[in-house]
Image (cartoon, coloured by chain):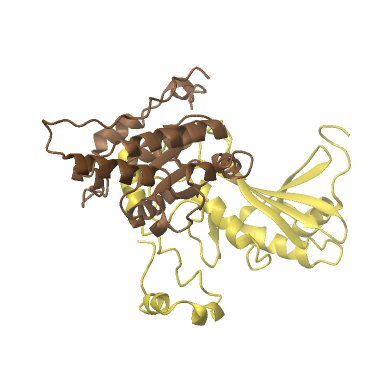
Amino acid sequence: MPHRGGPANPAADALRGRFGSAVQQVDVVWGETSVYVDGNRVLEIARWLHDDPGQRYDYLSDVTAVEYRDPEQPLEVVWHLRSLPYRRFLRLKAKLIKGTPLEVDSVWPVYKGADWLERECYDMFGVTFRGHPDLRRILMWEQYREGYPLRKDFPLRGRFSRAEQLRQALAANPEARYSMEELTIAQAFEDLPEAMRQRLASGEKTGE
Amino acid sequence: MGLTSPPAPRVVTHDPESQESWITTRLDFLVNWSRANSLWPMPFGTACCAIEFMATAASGFDLARFGMERMSFSPRQADVLICAGRVPFKLAPVIRRIWQQMPQPKWCISMGACASSGGMFDNYAVVQGIDTIIPVDVYVPGCPPRPEGLMYGIMMLQEKVKREKMADAALRNEMETDPASGLHIPPQAIDELSEPFGNSVHQTRSGL
């Protein structure tokens, strides 16, 4: 199998035919196809890939982002799609120019599994997903104020002194882990302990 | 292993200058002997050290020989907090809470390089030694320590317990935290404890 080139995933041509200029570039690397698309039309494209009977990309296996070492390179958001009926793999990428707001469409309306994946991407890279129902930090705690750890301009040890980091971490209440948004599994509400129900019903915010 | 042999069992002597009577020293001996041989550990296992800890507790090495027959998974019935593995900042308030829930007398063993110093994880997410959160009695080095290493640390702790005096009330003082910051040692001390060392100093050699 060649490193670059070779037969592209048929979805690439289909996307070109349907979305035209929204498809910016198609790469085939080690037999896997990457399609660079316009970040403003990702939702539309994902919906078509999901619904079209000739594509049926019904499984979103990952949403992540890449920042390159060279500062002039744009940041890329990456979606890994898999079509279980056709056994095909497709990688969508959208370039986000640095210096502009890092925003793309959320694919949550199509793939509900994108919820936590996009939250992780937001947490680590600061990419905002428009239309995400509950875009909060997921790995770092909600009061985390040092920035986005996987960005290249983020110092490995963090921005604050160790004592300040520890002070902020210890200020968190280890029991205040659930927000009302998290409990939109509203059925679970009745099963919660009485104390927690009262706390949530009074509208207590857990983050700040 | 190049380690010095454990100190000889302490011979209880009567010092007429001190205020201790023969009764209290003998009582000390009895109480310390029973405490040292019935330490119930509270395992706080977060990483690979916990695997080694489980091996220590299992039949091959048999931690029960040291009176640690029962793993106390509830801090309120525990005597020794064994922190096995790295502690991220997100867990800092949790381990602090567990330590505060443990009744006196209590001791703490920091097992492995990560719990003792942050180890190789000199980054934004990991606490640089749990002694910045709670007081530690015994540090067990290793990555992870072999079961023999942990048992050596436990025997060191037993020696420490056997040297305690009931008359010394300061031994039972609860950790006092600064109400403003929640830290139990000065911030300068935390920064100094968290200073990078070894290869960790050169970790940003790419210049980014």
Q: Which one is in front, B109 or B104?
A: B104
Chain A colour is yellow
Q: Which one is in front, B137 or A134?
A: B137
| Rendering coords of residue B39 (x, y %) | 42, 47
Residue A186 visible in this rendered orientation of the protein: yes
Asked whether, in this view, residue A199 is left or right of residue A126, the answer is left
Compared with residue A200, is residue A63 higher up or lower down, i.e. above or below?
above
Q: Quadrant of residue A154?
A: top left
Q: Which one is in front, A178 or B30?
A: B30
| Rendering coords of residue B152 (x, y %) | 48, 31
| Rendering coords of residue B175 (x, y %) | 26, 47
Asked whether, in this view, residue A200 is left or right of residue A49, the answer is left
Q: Residue furthest top?
A: B2
Asked whether, in this view, residue B115 is left or right of residue A90, the answer is left
At x 41%, y 38%, the residue is: A158
| Rendering coords of residue B164 (x, y %) | 28, 39
Q: Quadrant of residue B6?
A: top left
Chain shown brown: that is B
Compared with residue B98, is residue A148 higher up or lower down, i.e. above or below?
above
Q: Which one is in front, A172 or B165?
A: B165
Q: Quadrant of the C terminus of chain A?
A: bottom left
Residue B121 visible in this rendered orientation of the protein: no
So how many labels did they put on this image? Answer: 0
